[in-house]
Amino acid sequence: MKQATDVFNDWAHRGKDEGMERGHGPAVREMLSAAYKRVISDNESFSFADLGCGNGWVVRLASEHEQCGHADGFDGAEHMIEKANAVDSENGYYLAMFPDAKPAM
């Protein structure tokens, strides 16, 4: 059986990650909107971390929120992290194998 990181590296090469972004986008936007309403105070900034960020599309989406001060993405698929970094230099993207990753924050 293939490792998940191998599958997602292959997806990055084939552009399948972009299909996930289009297909899951509406549901993720709805979930983020609900989360923002529950956990963010009116004048409070927040940081965002996406574990298993793929090409970083959710990180980019969260970072667009006016109160997001910082957003990072972590993924075990090297090619996904490469794609994320190629399109976004504003947020942080890190290659990390779970559950062993220990980000220094």
Image (cartoon, rainbow, N blue to C red):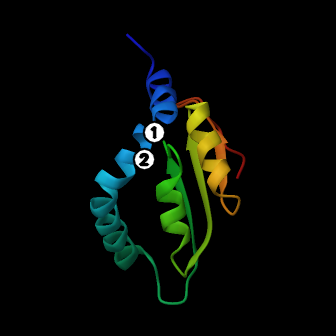
Q: Give the position of the N terminus as an image quadrant.
A: top left
Name the residue beneath numbered marker 1: 15
Q: Is residue 54 above or below residue 97?
A: below
The local secondary structure at tag 2 comes to: helix
Distance from label 1 to label 2 (Cα)? 6 Å
Contact (Cβ within 8 Å) of mark 1 with mark 2:
yes
Residue plotted at (52% across, 28% down)? 9
Residue 105, percent across and down? 70, 53
Residue 95, percent across and down? 64, 36
Question: Left of 79 or right of it: where is 7?
Answer: left
Residue plotted at (51% across, 76% down)? 65
Residue type beneath disc 1: Gly
Residue 91, percent across and down? 66, 60
Q: Is residue 91 above or below residue 80?
A: below
Residue 24, percent across and down? 31, 53
The local secondary structure at tag 1 comes to: loop
Residue plotted at (60% across, 44% down)? 83
Name the residue beneath numbered marker 2: 18
Tag count in the figure? Answer: 2
Q: Tag 1: Cα neighbours inside 10 Å, few (<14), some, or many (≥20)? A: few
Q: Residue furthest front?
A: 14
Residue plotted at (37% across, 67% down)? 32
Residue type beneath disc 2: Glu
